[in-house]
Image (spheres, coloured by chain):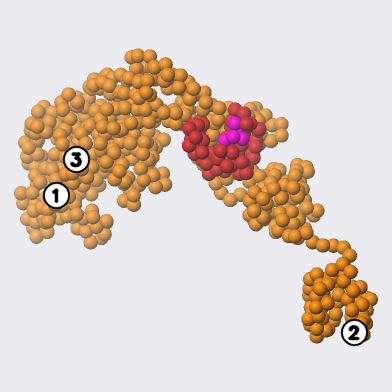
Chain colours: A orange, B red
Amino acid sequence: MKSALSTARKGYRFGELDLLSIVETVMDRQPRVLKNGLPNLAYFRAANAVLAQPDDEAEGHGFPQVEFWLTLARELDLVRDEGDRLVISGGVDAFFQQPFAQRRENIRQAFLDSHGLNDFALVNEIELPGLKKGGTVDVITDAPDVAARIAARRKVLELALAAGTDTRMARFIQQVQREAPNFVIDHSGDGSWRKVYYRGIRERSGREDVERDGGWDRVEGAYMRWLIALPFTRLGWVDFDPARGSFEVLDDNEPEPAFEIIIQPNFEVLALGDRLDAGQLWQVARFCRPALEGRVRKYLLEKKAFTDALGRGLSAASMVALLAELSRKPLPQNVRYSLDEWGASSERMKIWPDALVVEAEGVEDLGALLTTAMREKLGLVAVAGGHFAAPAPGPAALREHMPPRRAVLDYSRRLPAVITPQPGLRLQAPSEILHLRARQLLELVARRQSTDFWQLDPALARDAALAFGPDEMRRRIEEALTRPLDPAHALALRGWSGEFEPAFAGNAEVFLCDSEAQSELLEMLPDFSAWLDRKLGRGAYLLRPGGAATLRKLLESYGIKLRDHNRRSS
Amino acid sequence: MKFHLHVGLIEADTEQALEEALAIARCRQRVLARLAPNVAVLEKGDTQLVITALQELGMHPKVIK
């Protein structure tokens, strides 16, 4: 931090705007999370740039403020990991909907109780080289553990709040050193061979651990300075003035928010005022795209963000009303027109990317069958055709609200094979267990004959083979079958899909000879080969039309008699 | 009634609009079922393809999550 907030901008309300910026940056970027559990450097830079008092990357201390707010955001369930991405969490809306005092209380408690926040490691003036060893067992360090850090935060806060107005930081640190020297690191037995140094704690860029003798101010003092300058000030307990090196305790009676937004014809929304309210700004951010450039709070009204908000259940009217409420002037006409048009156009197509679909079968009236409680709890809405849909609920909600004795077909898993081949190219698929994947397959290659029976159809199978390829079509069918394809089904499907040339059945002229030596001699005879259509096997030949009579004459001219029946002579 | 969990569902205001959306995303062959002329059920991943394809064309359907 270059400097703390000026006295004109003090209290939790301004610190909360930093938290809002951190969350908005996550929403805007959805940064990739690295193996160490932190988002990528680009995110840190972007988030740091929109803080009230950004850290200076060139100083080489990293971005402790971003790390601080991000840890609290995670612990408050405002952001979460989704796969390898950091995204905003479902809890973020509920958090910012809380009254101001409640939000402040929650975040203060989250800080005081935080297990994940290693605030000792965020202090600029010291470093913990043991952390670089990644938790190997040979690291010996005097750096405080989670319990010690939690106790230390509470102790320093208690002493700071009791310190009174305009307390010099240096004097306060001396007071704590006198009254509670062991508030974070135990100093009993200092000077013994074991306690000469703060093991594993160095000054920034130092080459050796800090000596305990005379090092209290450089370690505990630095930690206290950091606590007061960042968490205590940003969370509104105190106001620290770095120029004077003193802090004053604040009361919790913070002034009411005072700001307005200006909506420009180019769809920019600017938030202006001395005391912005993070709760209301978050409501705006949820249907705009935060334009995080510098410290001016600017949002862009964009169709995607607006329709996404509609998808989350917000109404276009409520969003327009919020803008109108926060703005002194009416919405520009082109903006209002566009918002109305976006709202109307998004209603023309609705998509549930991960849904629970309740399918009405036959003449079922789901409106009457589904209980009101179930529809409300699961968020089921009617879609065309008498069916209902809702975003896929979690397993617990589903278990709680599902009607008894009803199976749920879970398409995130492999579904059972339900199609059984029947004689005569028929397939049996009982409708009560037929799932949509199996039904899709049946509709690709067969026509429904009755409730449970389907008949393979040559034209459909041919089209499906053209679309997917014969092998893929057959693979899909075989996967959905309760037992392997019958030869008749396989022959038909492979024949229809063009895998086999049409076979010949009819009268043909055939030449058979039982002697291998004779057939070898015949094959060398040009007059024989001229009438040969193909060799069918050893000593078996298919002849061209008229070949039998011609060859009979030819061979008889050599004195070879041919037999008229195809049975071997015994 | 049947309960289908973790599928994608698209409901358009007209059958033609639905056909166009599926054609844009090249997902017509992947439709699991047409529950009504203007309602299609797809696998989740295919539904995401439709959303992405529509958004790339500047069309922003109402995505209900």
Seen from the viewer's position, the closer of residues A162 and B65 is: B65
Query: Are the residues under badges 2 and 1 in a single subunit?
Result: yes
Question: Where's residue A345, x and y in %?
Answer: 52, 26
Cα separation, mark 1 vs mark 3, equals 15 Å
Q: Indicate which disc, 2 or 1, sits on the residue closer to the N terminus.
A: 1
Query: Left or right: A569 with respect to A542?
Result: right
Query: Are the residues under badges 1 and 3 in a single subunit?
Result: yes
Seen from the viewer's position, the closer of residues A45 and A15 is: A45
What stretch of residues is rendered in magenta? Answer: B17-21
Q: Is the magenta stretch mostly helix, strand or loop?
A: helix
Q: Which residue is drawn at 24% across and 28% down?
A: A14
Q: Indicate the amino acid at tag 3.
A: Asp
Q: Quadrant of residue A496?
A: bottom right
The residue beneath circle 1 is: A204
How many labels, in total?
3
The residue beneath circle 2 is: A558
Above or below B5: residue A270: above
Cα separation, mark 3 vs mark 2, equals 108 Å
Q: Which residue is drawn at 19% across and 58% down?
A: A140
Seen from the viewer's position, the closer of residues A182 and A476 is: A476
Q: Could you say whether the residue bearing mark 1 is in a helix, strand or loop?
A: loop
Q: In which quarter of the image is residue A240?
A: top left
The residue beneath circle 3 is: A56
Q: Say whether residue A322 is visible.
A: yes
